[in-house]
Amino acid sequence: MAFKPKKKGGTESSSFMERIAKRLRTLLVDSRRKRTQVFSFGCIVVGLLVIYLMQGLVLHKNKQDSHYPQIHGHYTEEISSTQPLIFPPIEHADRLKQLNLRNLHMLRIDLDGNKKYVLKEDDKPTTDKERKEITDDFELVKREYLDHGKRVFSKGSDSPEVVVVTLVDFDQHDADTLIPVVQNRVDYAQRHRYGVYVRWAQEFIPTIDDQDLTKSYEFLKPLMMRAAMHAFPKAKYFWFLDQHALIMRMDLSLQAQLLDRKILELAVLKNVPVVKGSNIKSYNHFVPDQAEVIIPLTNDGQLDSNSFIVKAGLYGKAFMDYLGDPLVRDYSWPSFSASIGHALQWHPSFLAKAALVVPRTIASVYDPTKSITEKANIDDFHYTQGDFVALFNGCQERDSCASNLGLLYPQIQK
Amino acid sequence: MSYSMPFNAVYEDEKKRQLDYKRRSPLDRIGSAIARHRKIALGVFCTLFVVFWFGFSQFTLFARNPKIVLILAVNDGGGVHKWKGEQDWAIERISIQNKRGYAKRHGYGLTIKDMRTAKRYSHEYREGWQKVEVLRQTMREFPEAEWFWWLDPETLIMEPQLSLEDHLFKRMDALSYRALDDFNPLQLPSDIPYVDYSEQPELFITQDCGGFNLGSFLIKNSDWSKLLLDVWWDPVCYEQKHMMWEHREQDALEALYAREPWIREKTAFLPLRSINAFPPGACSEFSDDTRYFYSEEERDFVVNMAGCSFGRDCWAEMQRYGTLLETHNRKWWRSFF
């Protein structure tokens, strides 16, 4: 050997434990071996890090193990749609009317003889293969009707910010009346990159107790809004627009018309009675940024539930859930807007988030006795040319829904 | 002192000695300092007076805002419907001391709320509003607190050495359950649409043999819980159901939980024995079900003598658990006395 060992003797005589102690000292504390020490401490740190990460992984797995049901709508199985325009084939309206709820849903009769339609929650979506095998036209229409409620906007796609929601009734109107209504929403949404969510009102009948549609139609609105929020989980605003209404100005976006903070600030009615004659007034210090429910207050002091906007936040969802709670919904309200009025008067948390706005913004009412070119009086809010929306409130009583729609549809400004 | 006075050496010495700054007692020195700076002293006094007397509740020298606040409801009924006897007072005292000691030991806040029957609650439609109003008031009182722990008067914290963090919050995920598949005494629907279970729970309650039990529960200080407290009592619901809802706010919450997804998604359940164990007298028809009852061997955290005033002996139960609490927490030096 050419070189001499640094230290002589001693090493052989020292015991095993002493040698280990010496080694450790060299590795960890000896001031002359800085480089070795840095390396050994580095090793320890990396080791700890790995253990920590592994632990995190294991804990994370534990959390995922919890077997809570996935969020779902009324049906447990869902169909994912890449198009933000979700509406049923309106041309089926007449055949659906012939089929009637008796053929579309299961009818359950209990011991007391009460008949009730029930929803088959675990109903499976029809596959393409099955659809090809169905030859009966009515069966195909029925399958399509049952599958429509399962459609949700797919999570991966770019979500629209605003969704226009409409509830259509095939018992009341034929396809010729409803097609322009839905086409109007779709045209508008396509122009502004919004979403559309249209459902048959009859689809909700099995989920409620009072299954007479003419009486319950209004009270389906909160259920419909909740379904829309589920179908578009990332959308921010949901605009409910009744089937008896048309968007007359295609060029106005909802943001520019109402949702923009400054415009909302101008449109909000502060310190006015929530409903006519109420002692409860809307807040004077209302903050438009926090608005989660936007609802027009007509000049007669009524809340107009035919056109309102709900934001998909805590308060918006809770408000819809509250209004759709069977205990609240099935109370003998004179109208759906009365139940909204009750909620706002009794629950200050809701009132603080509810913007009561001037009706001209999203709820001008078409009045056939008045000319649409005539300027409205201050205390009037009927539709005149250039308004954003025309509502046909009361057209069912006048029996003029179809004719009113037919009259105004060609006048829509593209 | 005039010049015409005769010179007196003794007197002069005495005067010097008195004026000698260093020899005077500290109290004297402060007194003379105040006398010399009268205006400043007055100013300081006035400021302190205003500050302590007229609010700034934040301005206390050692105030820390507690993160967890215990709400103890006492004086239930307030002797309006039945006489409040000696034993009732004693029970209340033991209960308050128990919580006070616990809160002090772990640095929690404690607020004691009077639940006497007031006229505004006496109408049948309103009789249950009180708990909700007390909670809302406490949330205003402690805006900085994160969690509130509600406790009924007939409860005893049996293991005061356990902090809520160790006992509950650190293992909440493993301890609590949210699906009602395993334990569902009310037969509520186990799954309703639109419930998003990825939300973190903000209300932890327990279920006993008869359904929800609100004798001991935790609620977070959040927008959600404020909204819940607002919606909990609705005249329209209560008008329809007040004959059926025997347990008032408990039944109302059950109804909300059963039907409104926004409430269900933030509600979780704790096992009854974790914060609300029963004595054998309660839920007596299920006496062989160990899920409900306080176990001495397993050292359950809290015992709740729920419903002891309905045909059971509150005082005997309180004494029994009080003695047990003492034997469990006896210090070693106590054996000498």
Image: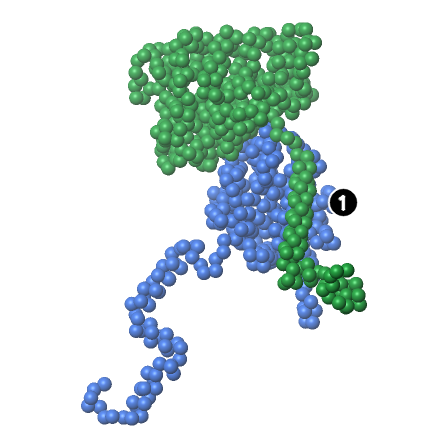
* Res. A147 visible in picture: yes
Between B209 and B111, the one lying in front of the other is B111
Q: Colour of chain B?
A: blue
Residue type beneath disc 1: Asp
Residue B49 place in picture, x, y as percent: 37, 61
Asked if residue A261 is positioned above or below residue A92 in the image, the reply reads below
Vertical order, A32 against A217 (above or below): below
* Pointer 1 residue: B288
The disc numbered 1 marks a residue on which chain? Answer: B
Residue depicted at x 38% and y 58%: B51
Place residue A360 in its image quadrant. Answer: top left
Residue situated in front as seen by the camera: B26 or A403: B26
Determine the colour of chain A: green
Q: Position of residue B288 (x, y in %)?
A: 76, 45
The location of residue A34, given as percent across then percent down, is 63, 58
The one of A111 and B167 positioned closer to us in this rendering: B167
* Residue drawn at the location 54% of the way across and 11% of the way down: A90
Q: Position of residue B263 (x, y in %)?
A: 57, 35
Left or right side of B139 for B278: right
At a point 44% along the width and 59% down the height, the residue shown is B60
Under circle 1, the secondary element is: loop
Quadrant in which the N terminus of chain B appears: bottom left
Q: Which quarter of the rendering shows the C terminus of chain B?
A: bottom right
Judge by depth and name the residue closer to the eye, A219 or A157. A157
A347 vs B165: above or below = above
Residue drawn at 51 percent across, 19 percent down: A196
Marker count (numbered):
1
Q: How is the image coloured?
A: by chain
10 Å crowding of disc 1: few (<14), some (14-19), many (20+): few
